[in-house]
Image: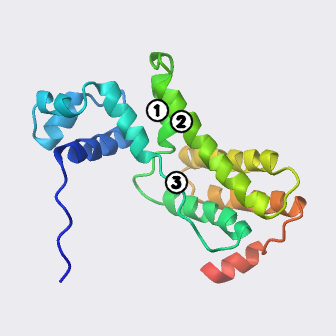
Amino acid sequence: MASPPPKQTMKERILETADKLFYLQGIRAIGVDTIAAEIGISKRTLYNHFPSKDALIEAYLQRRFVQPRPSDKPPAEQILATFDSLERRFSAKDFRGCPFVNAVAELGPDDEDRTVRNIAVAFKESRRVWFRDLLRQLDVTDAEALATQLTLLVDGSIAQDLVRDDPAMARAAKDAARVLLANAGVKVGSASADKKRTG
């Protein structure tokens, strides 16, 4: 019999609750009072773990800063699979876009020390570098530029899905990524082969 999962610490409970509320309802819309009430603790208890709302926002974004899992799949497959993953995410009822872009858009001028913007830039750059490193394995001539273009396809498909509520935007971005890779000399499977695998 499997052992029960370890009990969450209070700090983890606060962060998990903040994560859910900030992402679904917005950072500005949710105050520490709401988070404390949701958990059933006092504001003082919350502040014992996070001295300010800014500290909680920073911890929320750091929690979302997850690196892609290592994979044995060929580099081109890993790149294209990014868009399959996006399509699945777009189909979820709780999808509200990129938490990093949302945070920068919401906090903008109030982010005086640029903490939020710096975390967002670091996250976006980590994704671009992940693409670049895979492209270098494929001996692409200008891996830097193509990595940037692929990142733009990811962000563009997220924006389009938010506006249109259409997960097919990820498929359109994948088709565009396939064209970019082919133009860079990378052998990629056809879109029809993908449909056969998933259909």
Q: Nearer the viewer, residue 97 or 9?
A: 9
Q: Earlier in the sequence, mark 2 or mark 1?
A: 1
How packed mark 2 is, by other alpha carbons closer than 10 Å (few <14, some 14-19, many 20 or more), is: many
Q: CA distance from mark 2 to mark 3?
A: 14 Å
At label 1, the amino acid type is: Ala
Q: Is residue 26 visible?
A: no
Q: Nearer the viewer, residue 19 or 2?
A: 2
User: Circles 2 and 1: CB distance less than 8 Å?
Assistant: yes
Q: Nearer the viewer, mark 3 or mark 1?
A: 3
Q: Amino acid at mark 2?
A: Ala
Q: Are marks 3 and 1 in contact (CB under 8 Å)?
A: no
Give the total of numbered labels. Answer: 3
Kindly identify which residue carries mark 2: 120
Seen at 69% across and 76% down, the residue is: 194
Closest to the camera, between mark 2 and mark 1, is 2
Q: Closer to the camera, 186 or 51?
A: 51
Q: Is residue 107 left or right of residue 25?
A: right
Q: Which residue is mark 3?
A: 67
Give residue 65's position: percent from left, percent from top: 47, 46
The type of colouring in the image is rainbow
Left or right position of 23 against 156? left
Q: Mark 3, residues whose alpha carbon is within 10 Å: few (<14), some, or many (≥20)?
A: few
In front: mark 2 or mark 3?
A: 3
Q: Is residue 141 above or below residue 109?
A: below
Residue 110 lies in quadrant: top left
- Left or right? Give the position of 111 relative to 161: left
> Which residue occupies 42% across, 39% down?
61
